[in-house]
Structure formats: structure tokens, C-alpha cells
């Protein structure tokens, strides 16, 4: 086929769009309105897969080592351009501008510049001449591609002895050979030479721990002194070798604010966030075999998320944020320190998504300060608290802890990381409003899982978890009100198939206490239909009445005349034994025996039930829904009404050749798979079955979905 011009345009247009969109969602695009995102590279970083990651995510490149004086210019007259050139040429071909790193540093330096053949210091004029030649040669060679230079690196001291009595304060400068020979004049000279060599490049002073209160003051004082003397310093580079515990974003933001009063350009030049607090010489470069636990990953992700939030807020002055290395594989702090956004196999970590998929709307909002104790708190406990928008706030006392994480938060972050306040408590507020309704959570303190002593406990995830309630706008339907109340009683029944004594909770509606009722003027036995109602995977027989409020939902519906009074039986579905990911090994028939051969007969013989299929229903949430599906399809003669709450669907093909139920109820939250529910109900209806679907607005796989589902399902039963 020949392409006409319009078709060509369409085809090539698509091709263009396709190739752009291959690289469209990277970090550089997410941050295009904020700052450039850069990466430090070495010559081993150019496999096809690595090039793809670089091109997708970064629009600035730094040579990790290859432009350092010691690498480029190891001896007088000896230049080694090969590696720096190859990276610069790749950047030229791909039109990615470079940061130059670095011109003067006490480490990886061309030390020959400072000394004569015998090893003695040369005169500082000789050194300046050599340095000037070096700077001019290097800066000129890369002028076309390098837009800024780290002119001086790490010239300030880590500690400074304070003044005491008559003794003056110690030197704020690092006692390097450079300093010993020249005092702080070498700093001024280096900037002057760089400006001569390229008047267009931005010139930076670069240092580590630049967020530290003391060190930031020393950096500030030095840069101020230099600028006041006319030294051409354009910006301050904050290296950014951070860890999962430190610094606080308050300190980091304060340092930026302080520098911003002095310079117009601040760059994060060497970002990585390692999983421990070791520094410099003590850094354990190889922690082979050290497993990175989920709580460490949560801290890592959160530290990145908080840092980028802080940087976005400072976008007016922050112009580039550069990661120090591409992936953990070649991180200078060691693969096992887990420092970057890409793991050792170049896979994106959670932290990558937290940095990439930020919600700008949440950057500058703070919650309304109308927090009240959660209604599920233990007696007299103030925290956790909830505000009118659905934010949750936590306060935990753990004086010796290094980290406290609450497992509850906005999706994908592994929870909310608390910070130690000046009062010694650990504090934190969810990043945004939570879904309305009930949530389980726990604390992880230095890797150990404990409950929040402020909150009551609810069985879920195969443990008694802390619970918190975000008041729902429709909470009235499960509220404890002044209406006639039924009873929830615990029963114990014998199970021959498992040879155990088993428990169940039985709700009998208000009025059950009367053995007879009047019908047509005659006293007849007061009998009730029964709903067998199952919990989910990590829950047990307590869940539906504790956190589900099944009894209150029924009390209220019955009081309003919206549903027939019926009995609810809630027993343990034997689901806790299932290991995640081993669903197909689960023996569904064990519970079916207990339920249908043992519990149903027991209930029918110990309660006044109407003991037939049309007056018996089964429903369950999540894995209890799957149990319901299996049990009802295996023995369709036992139950007449079937309900799956976030627990799958029935399809017409499931119902071929079996006795159809009187009514099926399928539901889930709008944040689950509502389309699947709608389609299943349409298909069932079209095939002539009676089915009702329900989607709980604004909720996910959680108890408000199931409370609402029970409220919608109950009126449909036994009709
Ligand atoms: C590091 C490199 O990543 C290593 O490969 C090298 O062995 C030592 O230097 N501060 C800096 C960077 O300014 O140049 C350092 O880079 C890391 C600390």
C-alpha cells in the first residue's frame, strides 16, 4: 500500500507520539515544572537497559569520578580524557546537559599541583598557576555541554570547637593541604579561574551534611564572606548523602531557606538515602546478605517522599536534584545499603513511585485542626485522633526508639512514618484523608510489631489489630440507637469431622424471646429464617459483630420495618490457616462439612428456625465470599439466598444444571472492581436469574463496604 501524505502524517505522528511516550512518564517529566532531575554516571553505566532508564528519567548528568582532577590530570602534563570524553559525547549525542564535578577537592585531587619533586609544598603562586591551567583546560573542553561546575568541594570542617574563655573558636575550614598552603584564598582563586574560563557556567560550592545546623552556618559564613569580597559564587550544592532516619525535613528546609538568602541557585548534587546511619570512613560498603525488611523499605520510601515534597516547596531556588548513581548495583555506599530509587537489578522501588507519583494538591495543604479522639479508643485515651476531613493523627510514646511507623496511611507507602517531637513523643498525621469507616492498623517500632495502646483491638490479619474509625457520613445505619435490640450470644457446638468444640456467635432479633406469636388470632411458634454470615481471610467469628456491627445494622433495619427479622449465625471459617499465595492448596470442603453437616443441624435443633432452604441464606465477605460461592455451588439445596461481598461473582455458567437460588447479591467497594459486579449482575439477569448488585461509593476492601452491603442485602432476603 502506498501512503498518501495525510496517512503518512498520521503514521509518523503516531510513531513520534509512541517514541515520546516510551520516555514520557519518567522523573524528569514529573518534575518539569519544578527542577531538573540528574544522575551521576560512570562508564560502566551504558548497557541498553541502563541507557533506557537514563533517557526516561534524567535530564542532567554528572560524571561520578571521571572529571575529578586526580582522574583527569594525575601528573603534570598527563591528561586522561578518555572516560570523561566518552560520557560527555554520549550526553552530546543525547542532548543531555552536564554538571561538572569537580575542580578543587582535597580528595581524588591532582596532588602534584601542591608539591615539588621532593614532596615539599610549592609556593602558593606556583600552585595557583597550575590550578589555573587545569581549570582553564578542563572547563574549555566541556564548555559546550557543562552548564555548571562544582568549583570547590568539601572545604568546610565537620565540627568546629566553640570559643571558650579567652580561647577563640576553632577553624571553620577543613585542615586540608589546600588550606594549609593557601588558607581560604584557594577557594576564591578557584572561582575566579572558573569564571574566567567560562563566564556562562553557574559556579557552585558543594559540600555534604549541608543540612546540619552547625555545618550550614559554616558554609553560609564562608560563602557570604567570599561573595562580599566579590568572589563569583552562584550557588550552593547540598550533596545529599542522607539516611532513612536523618535528617528531618525541617532541618533540610531550614538550610535551604538560609542559603536562599545568599544565592539564587541551590542544587542537590549527590542524592542517596541509605538504610543505616554510617558515614564516610565507617560506611560499611558491603553489607552482603543483610536483608532489607519491609519496615526499612517503608522508612526509605517515606524519607524520599518527604524530601521531594520539601524540594518541591523550594522549587523557586532549587534547580537540579541529582542522584548519586543510577542503581543500587553501583552505588558508592554499597548495594546492600539500598540507597537509590532503582534496585541492584534496575527495578523501580516503591520509593521511585513515591517520588514520581506525587499529588501536588497535597503539597501545601494542612489538615483542619479539629481532631478528636477516635471513637474506638481505649478508655481515657486521647490518641489516635481523627479530624472532620478524615485525617488520622497518631501519638506514640517510645523514648528510646529510632523509628515508629503506623501501618495506616495513603496507599503504596507502607504506612505513616512518625517523627519524634520536641516533647519526646512520636507524632504523625496521615498524608491525606482516609476512606470513611473502620481500619485495622498496628505500629512497627524499630522493626517490632505492636499495637497502639490508645486504641481497642479487633481481630483481623490473623491477629488482634488496633482499630480506628473514620466517621462515615452515613454512619447512622450502624449507630447504637434507642430501638429494640436483639442479642448476640456465643454458642459452642461439637464438630465430629474436626473432632473439636467450635464457637459461633448467634444474633437473635428483638422479639425472639417470645416463643409464640399471634397469627390470625392464634398463637403460633415464633420461628425465624437464618443467615450464615462469614468473615474474611484473617478474621474470625468475632469480626461481623465487633467491627461489622451486623447486630446494630439489623436492629436498625428491623426497627424501621425495612427487613424481616432473622437470625444471623457467625462462625469461624477456618481461613486463618491459609498462607498468602497458596489459595489453590486450600481445602474448601473441610469448612463445608462443619457448616452444613454440623452447624446448620445444631442451629436448627437449638434455635427456633424455619429449617428449610427458602429460609436459609449464606453470605460472606472477601474470602468468606469465596467460601460462600464454593459451598452454595457445591450444595445448592442447603441455602436459598446467596451473597458475595467483595468475594467474587456468580456467572450464568456456574448455575447450569443446579437448583437456582431465589436471589443472589453481589457487591464491592467503588475502589475495588465495580464493573465486574455490574457485568455479573447484568449477565445473571439476562440469563433469567434473580440477582442484585451493589457498589459502596468511595470505599475499598474494607468494613464500611461490608456494613453497607449487609444493609442493602438484608431487605432482599427471605422475600
Ligand atoms: C565518590 C564516588 O562515588 C566513588 O566512586 C569514589 O570512589 C569516591 O568518590 N562526595 C563527592 C563525590 O563529592 O565526588 C564522592 O564520589 C562522594 C562524596
Image (cartoon, rainbow, N blue to C red):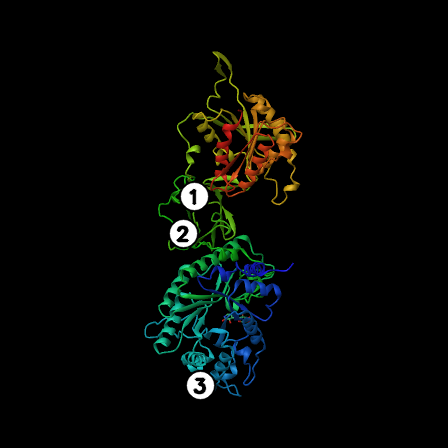
Please count the marks in the image. Answer: 3
**Is residue 169 among the parts visible in the rendering?**
no
Please say if 346 is above or below 157: above
Q: Position of residue 463 (x, y in %)?
A: 53, 41
Give the Cα distance between marks 3 and 2: 54 Å
Q: Residue furthest top?
A: 521
Disc nearer the start of the sequence (3/1): 3
Q: Nearer the viewer, mark 3 or mark 1?
A: 3
Q: Position of residue 511 (x, y in %)?
A: 46, 21
**If the image is split into quadrants, where does the N terminus sit?**
bottom right
Please say if 86 is above or below 564: below
Q: Residues within 10 Å of mark 2 (few under 14, many from 20)?
A: some
Q: Position of residue 718 (x, y in %)?
A: 54, 25
Please say if 298 is above or below 473: below
Give the Cα distance between marks 2 and 1: 13 Å
Numbered circle sitting on residue 454: 1
Front residue of 447 and 156: 156
Mark 3, residue position: 124
Q: Nearer the viewer, mark 3 or mark 2?
A: 3
Q: Quadrant of residue 374?
A: top left
Mark 2, residue position: 425
- Residue at horizontal 48 percent and vertical 35 percent from the top: 708
Disc nearer the start of the sequence (2/1): 2
Q: Secondary structure at mark 1?
A: loop
Q: Residues within 10 Å of mark 1 (few under 14, many from 20)?
A: many
Contact (CB < 8 A) between labels 3 and 1?
no
Q: Position of residue 402 (x, y in %)?
A: 47, 55
**Is residue 688 among the parts visible in the rendering?**
yes
Amino acid at each position: 500500500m502506498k501512503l498518501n501524505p495525510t496517512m503518512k502524517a498520521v503514521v509518523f505522528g503516531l510513531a513520534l507520539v509512541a517514541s515520546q511516550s516510551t520516555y514520557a512518564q519518567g522523573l524528569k517529566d514529573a518534575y518539569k515544572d519544578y527542577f531538573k532531575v540528574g544522575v551521576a554516571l560512570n562508564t560502566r553505566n551504558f548497557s541498553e537497559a541502563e541507557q533506557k532508564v537514563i533517557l526516561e528519567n534524567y535530564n542532567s548528568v554528572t560524571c561520578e569520578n571521571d572529571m575529578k582532577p586526580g582522574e583527569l590530570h594525575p601528573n603534570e602534563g598527563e591528561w586522561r580524557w578518555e572516560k570523561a570524553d566518552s560520557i560527555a559525547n554520549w550526553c552530546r549525542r543525547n542532548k543531555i546537559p552536564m554538571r561538572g564535578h569537580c575542580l578543587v577537592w582535597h580528595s581524588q585531587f591532582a596532588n602534584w599541583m601542591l608539591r615539588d619533586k621532593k614532596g615539599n609544598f610549592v609556593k602558593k603562586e606556583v600552585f595557583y598557576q597550575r590550578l589555573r591551567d587545569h581549570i582553564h583546560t578542563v572547563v574549555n573542553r566541556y564548555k559546550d555541554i557543562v552548564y555548571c561546575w562544582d568549583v570547590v568541594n568539601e572545604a568546610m570542617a565537620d565540627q568546629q570547637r566553640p570559643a571558650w574563655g579567652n580561647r577563640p573558636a576553632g577553624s571553620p575550614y577543613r585542615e586540608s593541604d589546600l588550606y594549609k598552603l593557601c588558607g581560604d584564598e584557594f577557594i576564591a582563586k578557584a572561582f575566579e579561574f572558573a569564571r574566567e574560563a567560562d563566564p556562562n557556567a553557574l559556579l557552585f560550592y558543594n559540600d555534604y551534611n549541608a543540612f546540619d545546623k552547625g555545618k550550614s552556618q559554616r558554609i553560609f559564613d564562608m560563602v557570604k564572606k567570599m561573595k562580599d569580597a566579590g568572589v563569583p559564587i552562584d550557588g550552593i550544592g547540598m550533596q545529599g548523602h542522607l539516611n532513612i532516619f536523618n535528617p528531618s525535613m525541617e532541618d533540610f528546609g531550614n538550610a535551604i531557606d538560609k542559603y536562599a538568602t545568599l544565592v539564587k541557585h541551590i542544587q542537590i548534587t549527590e542524592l542517596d538515602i541509605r538504610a543505616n546511619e554510617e558515614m564516610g570512613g565507617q560506611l560499611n560498603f558491603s553489607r552482603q546478605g543483610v536483608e532489607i525488611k519491609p519496615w526499612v523499605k517503608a522508612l526509605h520510601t517515606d524519607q524520599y517522599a518527604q524530601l521531594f515534597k520539601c524540594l518541591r516547596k523550594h522549587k523557586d531556588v532549587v534547580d537540579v536534584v541529582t542522584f548519586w548513581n543510577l542503581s543500587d548495583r553501583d552505588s558508592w555506599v554499597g548495594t546492600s545499603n539500598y540507597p537509590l530509587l532503582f534496585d541492584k537489578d534496575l527495578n523501580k522501588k516503591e520509593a521511585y513511585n513515591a517520588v514520581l507519583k506525587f499529588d501536588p494538591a497535597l503539597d501545601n495543604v494542612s489538615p483542619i485542626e479539629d481532631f478528636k479522639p477516635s471513637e474506638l479508643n481505649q478508655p481515657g485515651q486521647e490518641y489516635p485522633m481523627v479530624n472532620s476531613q478524615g485525617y488520622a493523627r497518631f501519638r506514640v510514646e517510645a523514648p528510646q526508639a529510632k523509628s515508629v511507623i503506623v501501618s495506616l496511611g495513603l496507599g503504596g507507602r507502607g504506612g505513616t512514618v512518625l517523627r519524634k517531637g520536641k516533647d519526646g513523643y512520636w507524632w504523625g498525621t496521615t498524608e491525606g484523608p482516609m476512606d470513611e469507616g473502620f481500619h485495622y492498623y498496628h505500629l512497627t517500632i524499630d522493626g517490632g510489631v505492636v499495637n497502639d495502646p490508645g486504641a481497642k483491638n479487633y481481630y483481623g490479619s490473623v491477629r488482634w489489630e488496633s482499630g480506628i474509625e473514620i466517621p462515615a457520613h452515613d454512619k447512622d445505619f450502624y449507630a447504637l440507637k434507642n430501638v429494640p435490640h436483639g442479642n448476640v450470644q456465643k454458642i459452642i457446638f461439637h464438630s465430629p469431622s474436626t473432632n473439636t468444640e467450635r464457637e459461633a456467635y448467634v444474633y437473635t432479633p428483638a422479639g425472639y424471646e417470645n416463643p409464640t406469636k399471634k397469627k390470625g388470632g392464634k398463637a403460633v411458634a415464633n420461628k425465624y429464617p437464618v443467615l450464615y454470615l462469614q468473615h474474611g481471610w484473617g478474621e474470625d467469628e468475632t469480626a461481623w459483630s465487633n467491627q461489622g456491627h451486623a447486630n446494630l445494622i439489623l436492629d436498625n433495619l428491623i426497627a424501621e420495618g425495612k427487613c424481616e427479622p432473622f437470625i444471623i449465625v457467625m462462625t469461624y471459617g477456618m481461613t486463618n490457616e491459609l498462607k498468602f499465595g497458596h489459595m489453590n492448596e486450600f481445602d474448601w470442603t473441610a469448612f463445608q462439612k462443619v457448616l452444613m453437616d454440623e452447624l446448620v443441624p445444631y442451629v436448627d435443633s437449638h434455635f427456633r428456625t424455619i429449617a428449610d432452604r427458602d429460609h436459609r441464606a449464606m453470605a460472606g465477605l472477601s474470602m468468606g465470599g469465596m467460601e460462600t460461592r464454593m459451598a452454595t455451588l457445591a450444595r445448592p439445596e442447603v441455602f436459598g439466598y446467596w451473597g458475595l461481598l467483595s468475594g467474587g461473582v456468580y456467572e450464568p455458567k456456574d448455575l447450569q444444571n443446579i437448583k437456582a437460588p431465589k436471589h443472589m447479591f453481589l457487591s464491592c467497594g467503588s475502589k475495588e472492581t465495580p464493573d465486574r459486579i455490574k457485568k455479573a449482575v447484568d449477565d445473571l439477569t439476562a440469563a433469567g436469574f434473580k440477582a442484585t448488585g451493589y457498589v459502596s461509593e468511595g470505599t475499598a476492601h474494607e468494613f464500611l463496604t461490608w456494613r453497607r452491603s449487609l444493609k442493602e442485602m438484608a431487605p432482599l432476603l427471605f422475600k
